[in-house]
Image: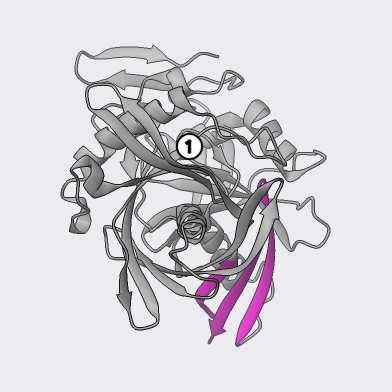
Amino acid sequence: MPFSRLFNVVGAHAEGEVGDVVTGGFLDIPAKTMHEKMLAFWTKHDQIRQLLLNEPRGREAKCANLIVVPWDPTADAGFLIMESEEYAPMSGSNAICVTTVLLETEMVPMREPSTTVRLDTAAGLVVATAECKDGKCVAVELENVPSFVLALDLEVNVPGFGPVLVDVAYGGMMFALVDASSVGQRLDDFGRNGAALVELGERIKQAVRATFTPVHPENPAISGVTNLVFTEPLTAAGDEMTGRNATVVSPGRLDRSPCGTGTSARLAVLHAKGLLDVGKVLRYRSFSGSEFIARVSRATTVGHYPAVVPLVKGRGFITSFQQVVLDSTDPYPYGFRVSDAWHNVEPSVLPEHRRECTRIINDEDGTLFESPK
């Protein structure tokens, strides 16, 4: 048999961030909750993520979403979010990609002018409302999981740089948020200073991890800062606020979209600081100019934390229809990473329970090593 694996994949992006959707090639994995389903897949089937996202089939600026049977009986579909270094409990750009693909491929029936799609994620139920016209998913607004602040103005010491103030908030993933100007940076169009932002952002992220470990009060398995958001001050434009961000994600790159979960975390911080009222619109832009339209739907609580329910709206687009295969004689069944593109290839942050290895090539000295099994 020439191919040992075959996956049907619909290519997609949401406001520039690639979030391909795997619609065939894997049967469901049994578990009691979606979060347990995510961990079970990570533990037993992580070679699929590596095959799809590592080179030569993938690249560092890419995510993939696996459609699975939902655990929540009220959901239309469940999905697992596969990123370069981890499985994310929730991702706004990926949820927009999934909603767009489900509707435009008719996996979920489309109704015009609006279709509601209930998505089961490892972070909880996310309700997507899609604007639909002429068979096209024009835009998707997500009612995300409740978001909340775990620390404001936390001082961390960044080796070789000095003290930095960060806010820590949950928006479906754990984020550290830093005012770019406070660390001598600005958010240039199309990431002209992207390499500097990534290098500094990864250093600040590690300093936060060494100082503070945020824990979700309702699911302790969700803990630790995952991504870092550089922000700029908001400006008023009529009844709206506008702002820009650059989100540094592992293994050392910028999110091409404004980052939906990062936007949710920013809403929680702004609301906690009294800078954004319920219902007021935030137009949140990435370095590439793409935009999410966001607002706080209502206030709530998560455990003992005051929280908000975010609404985040953006556009998704299908880019391709693919069959990704694994040749049974291919020498790279789990792919590889070369440090000219994968800037943070040290395997120190890889989960201990990952069973299959990733081949990592350091192009500076040609060293080849493997992450722990």
Instruction: Say whether residue 341 is left or right of residue 283.
Output: left
- Tell me which colouring the rendered structure shows: one colour
Q: Return the residue found at the far front.
A: 274
Helix, strand or loop status at disc 1? loop
Residue 331 in view, yes or no? no
- Could you say which is closer to the camera, residue 286 or residue 251? 286
Q: Residue at x 48, y 75 (%)?
A: 280
Q: Residue at x 47, y 54 (%)?
A: 269
- Give the image location of residue 293, x and y in percent: 44, 71
Instruction: Say whether residue 109 is left or right of residue 287.
Output: right
Q: Residue at x 35, y 24 (%)?
A: 345
117 within the magenta span: yes
Residue 278 in view, yes or no? yes
Q: Is residue 236 above or below residue 275?
A: below
- Could you say which is closer to the camera, residue 123 or residue 237? 237
**The C terminus - image quarter:** top right
- Give the image location of residue 148, x and y in percent: 58, 51
Q: Quadrant of residue 310?
A: bottom right
Q: Read off the magenta span.
A: 113-142
**The N terminus - image quarter:** top right
Q: Is residue 299 above or below residue 90?
A: below
- Give the image location of residue 304, x and y in percent: 69, 46
Give the residue pinned by disc 1: 226
75 within the magenta span: no
Q: Is residue 341 above or below residue 237?
A: above
State the count of labels: 1
Q: Residue at x 51, y 13 (%)?
A: 372
- Could you say which is closer to the camera, residue 201 or residue 43? 201
- Give the dominant element type of the magenta stretch: helix, strand or loop: strand
Going by the numbered disc 1, the residue's amino acid type is Thr
- Give the image location of residue 248, x and y in percent: 35, 42
**Mark 1 nearby-residue class (10 Å; few <14, some 14–19, many ≥20):** many
